[in-house]
Amino acid sequence: MTIPDDRLAQLAARFAELEARLASGTLEGDAFVAASRDYAELEPVARAAQDVRAMRGELASLAALDDPEMRELAEEELARLREQLPEAEHRLAVAMLPRDSADSRPAM
């Protein structure tokens, strides 16, 4: 499953916005609690998205190498990244799944 780059950018922007709001010190009471909860839920997704974006960027830069000597060295890294990228994208897709509303309620 390939997640579009624009969706990854949206996740990064939302995470950065939440970080900035929390760091501003202007939130109080319920607004702070809500922003903190959103931040805690989004953080693992944003980190996974950041990993996928970094891997895709590295793949693109290694694939664009023109120097034959450097190209040989990059082939190993390209193979490793091509192997790891689907797994990272799967982790991100799982992290992006919506949470069940029953998860936040007590079992009893």
Image (spheres, grey):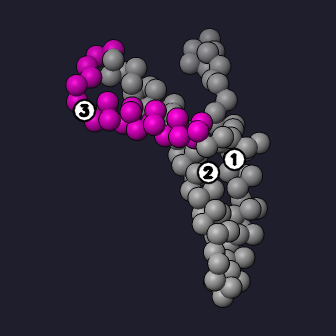
The spot of residue 97 in percent (x, y) is 67, 29
Which element is circle 3 on?
Answer: helix
Sequence-wise, the earlier of marks 3 and 2 is 3
- Mark sitting on residue 52: 2
- Which amino acid, by three-letter code, is at mark 1? Glu
Which residue lies at the image location 39% right of the left edge and 32% below the top edge? 18
Which residue lies at the image location 57% right of the left edge and 14% below the top edge? 105
Classed neighbour count for the residue bearing mark 1: other residues with Cα under 10 Å, few (<14), some (14–19), many (≥20): many
For label 3, the residue is 24
For label 1, the residue is 89
Which element is circle 2 on?
Answer: helix
Task: Check whether the beta carbons of the residues at disc 1 and disc 2 lie within 8 A of each other.
Answer: yes
Sequence-wise, the earlier of marks 1 and 2 is 2
The spot of residue 8 in percent (x, y) is 57, 41
**24 shown above or below 76:** above
Stretch in magenta: 6-30
Question: Quadrant of the rendered structure where residue 49 is?
Answer: top right
- Which amino acid, by three-letter code, is at mark 3? Ser
Which element is circle 1 on?
Answer: helix
The spot of residue 47 in percent (x, y) is 53, 46
